[in-house]
Amino acid sequence: MPTVPNSADALASLAAVIESRLPARGGNPESSYVARLLHQGPDAFLKKIGEEATEVVMAAKDADHGGDRAKVVYEVADLWFHSMIALAHYGLRPADVIAELQRREGMSGLEEKALRKVKERESVETKGAS
């Protein structure tokens, strides 16, 4: 039976490939889609993230009405992929996202959102006092 890598390994492996396409690492926009998006800058990959997020919503709506649920997986994979391009651009990795999700584990979503608002308010107040 073939071994299946755990999700963190799979994401780390894909992240390494994406990072190898960064302009600073010699990514060639002529031969790589990822390098081309990174070379074009944030507007290019952020636009793709928006498009993919919309496609996730459309696939989910279709699935709610008898459409193929596998299409939701396909579109989420595209969204994650393009989000990983953004992470690489900003010097971040999937492990950073996983760590944040682990930090939130056991905390209610409402509690987490309230805590975020308090931190944002404190940040604004600190900047205003400077």
Image: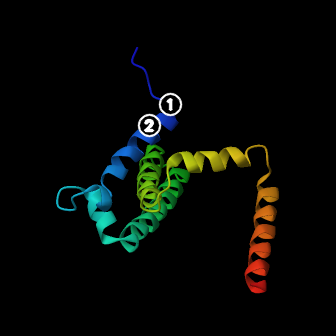
Q: Position of residue 43 (x, y in %)?
A: 39, 74
Q: Position of residue 125 (x, y in %)?
A: 79, 80
Question: Height in image: 41 above or below 110?
Answer: below
Residue 58, position as x, y percentages in the image: 48, 61
Q: Is residue 8 above or below residue 121?
A: above
Residue beneath the point at 79% across and 49% down: 107
The crowd level at tag 1 (other Cα within 10 Å; few <14, some 14-19, many 20+) is: few
Quadrant where the N terminus sits is: top left
Task: In this rendered view, identify the residue nearer to me: 22 or 103.
Answer: 22
Q: Is residue 54 left or right of residue 108?
A: left
Q: Is residue 30 left or right of residue 118?
A: left
The quarter of the picture where the C terminus appears is: bottom right
Q: CA distance from mark 1 to mark 2?
A: 6 Å
Residue at 73% in and 44% down: 105
The picture quadrant where one finds residue 36 is bottom left
- Labels in figure, total: 2
Residues tagged 1 and 2 counted as in contact (Cβ below 8 A): yes
Label placed on residue 100 = none
Question: Callout 2: helix, strand or loop?
Answer: helix
Tag 2: amino acid:
Ala
Decide which of 95, 112 is in the foreground and name it: 95
- Find residue 10 and name its label: 2
Residue 98: image quadrant is top right
Label 1 sits on residue: 6
Residue placed most toward the observer, 102 or 25: 25
Residue in the image at 38% along x and 45% along y: 16
Q: Residue furthest left?
A: 30
Local crowd size for mark 2, using a 10 Å CA cut-off: few (<14), some (14–19), many (≥20):
few
Amino acid type, residue under disc 1 in the picture: Asn
In the rendered image, the residue lying farthest to the front is 130
x, y percent for residue 72: 48, 49
